Image: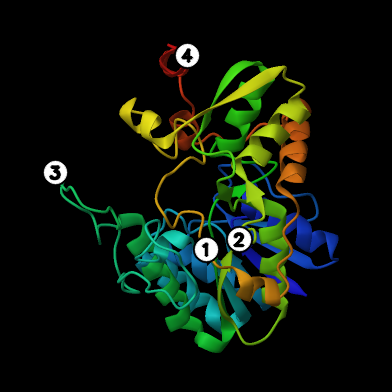
Amino acid sequence: MRICVLGGTWFLGRAVAQAALDRGWSVSAFNRGRSGAPPAGTHQIHGDRTVREDLLRLAQEGPWDAVIDTSASELAPKDVLAGAEVLEPVAGNYVYISTVNAYKGWPSEPLNESSEVLDGPADADADYGRLPANWQGPDWYYGRQKAGAERASLQAFGRSRVSILRPGVILGPGEYVGRLPWWLRRTSKGGTILAPGAPDKTIQPVDVRDVAAFALDQAAGRGGGSFNVTAPLGRETMDGFLSACLDVTGGAGQLVWAPDELLIESGVEQWTELPLWRTHAGVWSIDSSRAQAAGLRCRPLAETVMDTWEWLQGGGTPVEHPRWAEHGISLEKEQMILDRMSG
């Protein structure tokens, strides 16, 4: 197999490139060269996806059996469309890494692949879906942009040659968002640890390496389709996740579980201050059985936790990203809530 990874230098893109190399595939990586380097053995091609001349130069490096698009999170659909149209004559399949945010019902309701996708058009610019500052309803901007990018890939390559992967939360070595690293650092400090919600609340994070493997399987397959890419429903719990964090870090901590209502009353920001905690009914109710039937294999979350801790302890550093600073509750606010519970 000969593939082109759009991205390839950090987290999922790098995991895709490394996994393809491990399979003995020939890998080209197209990126701006600003966020590190792809794995050794990758043919790196520098360029900007918003510059047509760079895209035309990339196409001259083909042909490829497949293109795997891991770097479109901040691109407008029209830019995804322009790149896909240039690459279509020199590529077989196109694998687009989207997100569950593309569904209109996320995170409020359970989802499967037949759920309604948001209304982003294939040629939308970066302003499509922006809301006024005083908007009080759901903010679908990011989801509309990703839905438009999905349609862009389909418009350029056709439904039979496109696989759309919609992960939820991706964790693992190399994570740049900071969710799992924050919990690992907090549990390593020990003490009384504020744990969010109910311990038996089920969650569905997926390991970055499992997403990468499934993307490669789709690149090599035939028929395309859309797939939710999450851990199986009901397998993992918040207590299992935090207990694994305590185990691997050796922290002598004690988890104290705070009810959702108390956390909300205390002004805890959902999804960020206590990462992975969110009360919406559908956030961890994503049916990924179609992907599992197509070969998705999700390792236990405890393995992801252990490997991420080893990566951090071994000097691993993520690509700098502003989202890292969003995650984690201050020790002062944590203690205030713990005091309320014991008072």
- For the point 66% across and 60% down, the residue is 211
Q: Which residue is mark 2?
A: 233
- Left or right: 70, with 25 as reference point: left
Q: Disc 4 designates what residue?
A: 342
Above-or-below relation of 146 to 249? below
In contact (CB < 8 Å): disc 3 and disc 2: no
Residue 150, x across and y down, in percent: 44, 72
Image marks 2 and 1: residues in contact by CB distance under 8 Å: yes
- Packing grade of label 4 (10 A; few <14, some 14-19, many >=20) is few
- Evaluate whether residue 319 shows in this view: no
Q: Quadrant of residue 148?
A: bottom left
Please name the amino acid that badge 1 sits on: Ile
In the rendered structure, which disc, 3 or 1, sits on the residue that comes first in sequence? 3
Point 46% across, 18% down: residue: 334
Position of 17 with respect to 267 (left or right) is right
Q: What is the spatial separation of the Cα atoms under label 2 and label 1, in whole angstroms?
A: 7 Å
Please rate how many residues cluster around mark 3, counting C-alpha atoms within 10 Å: few if below 14, some from 14 to 19, many from 20: few
Q: Are marks 4 and 2 in contact (CB under 8 Å)?
A: no
Residue of label 3: 134
Mark nearer the viewer, 4 or 2: 4
Between disc 3 and disc 2, the foreground one is: 2
Residue type pointed to by label 2: Leu
Residue bearing the label numbered 1: 286
Element at label 4? helix
* Other residues around mark 1 within 10 Å, as few (<14) / some (14–19) / many (≥20): many
